[in-house]
Amino acid sequence: MAAEDSNDDLPETSKLTRTKQRWAQEGRFLTGRTARMESERLPPGQHLVRDWPVLDLGQQPEIALDRWQLAIDGAVESPITLDWPRFQSEPQSGKTSDIHCVTTWSRYDNRWTGVATRDLLDLVMPTRDAHFVILHSHDRYTTNITLEDFASEDAILAHSWEGKPLTRGHGGPVRLVVPHLYFWKSAKWLKRIEFATRDAPGFWEVNGYHNRADPWKEQRYSDE
Ligand SMILES: Nc1nc2c(c(=O)[nH]1)N[C@H]1C(S)=C(S)[C@@H](COP(=O)(O)O)O[C@H]1N2
Ligand SMILES: [Mo]
């Protein structure tokens, strides 16, 4: 099933989802600034928060650890399905990074624990023509990133935040964290990582949001 096809039959569209679609149409929050000063930690148009907001399509799937599985397939030499013990037996990494949400909040210094995406790549070995990664979640959310962005040094499949298991609201048991892109690229409740030779825009990418989503270039919406 193509990622685009799955949006129509998502459960009822929430008010926030409709509002965010409208923001994309109106170009809300764009400052027109693009340059990144090395000294600036906060990307243009963002403000700092201390709490950690929860944002999703309004459905928070509950997945028990003994039923949890993560399929990694597509354009790879060695497709694999990890269960919880197998996932825990992979090399564990810690990463600290900032969150930048396209709705303009940012949160500094989030400490994640999990499996670095680079270690995952060693496990499945993408084929030479794999250039994209499509993330599939239990709430039927999808999002797409390039293999290069997926493989970035700070990217991690996180099961813990600040030393505690990720809550269900924040995407537990396992979510992706790709901190150098707007946070909608960081899929919660991950169930499948699909390597692909061709790009396939995900839920927000077909609803007016930017395909790449670099906060430093303010890549919020798809018409820029
Ligand atoms: N599976 C899934 N992942 C998702 C989303 C979603 O609706 N479903 N929302 C995205 C968006 S728009 C944001 S801003 C972040 C929010 O993560 P948080 O709720 O932990 O802050 O998750 C992203 N990952
Ligand atoms: Mo978001």
Image (cartoon, rainbow, N blue to C red):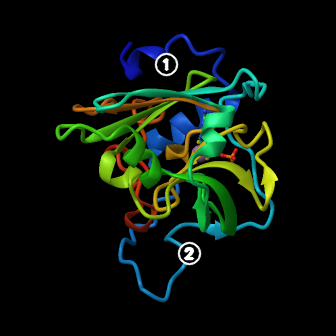
Viewer-proximal residue among 24 and 218: 218
Q: Which residue type carries mark 2? A: Leu
Figure quarter occupied by ligand 2 = top right
Say left or right for 47 vs 6: right
Res 66 → quadrant: top right
- Image quarter in which the N terminus is found: top left
Viewer-proximal residue among 169 and 117: 117
Q: Is residue 106 above or below residue 72?
A: below
Say left or right for 182 vs 126: right
Residue 42: mark = 2
Viewer-proximal residue among 116 and 152: 116
Task: Please say whether residue 207 is visible from this viewpoint.
Answer: yes
Q: Tags 2 and 1 in contact by the CB under 8 Å rule?
A: no
Q: Position of residue 201 (x, y in %)?
A: 36, 32
Residue 7: mark = 1
For label 2, the SS is loop
Viewer-proximal residue among 201 and 17: 201
* Residue density around tag 2, few if under 14, some if 14–19, many if 20 or more, within 10 Å: many
Name the N-terminal-most of marks 2 and 1: 1
Q: Position of residue 157 (x, y in %)?
A: 57, 47
Q: Residue at x 28, y 30 (%)?
A: 75
Q: Residue at x 60, y 67 (%)?
A: 98
Q: Is residue 69 above or below residue 2?
A: below
Residue 36: mark = none
Q: Residue at x 65, y 29 (%)?
A: 57
Task: Please say whether residue 224 is visible from this viewpoint.
Answer: no
For label 1, the SS is loop
Q: Position of residue 176 (x, y in %)?
A: 56, 45
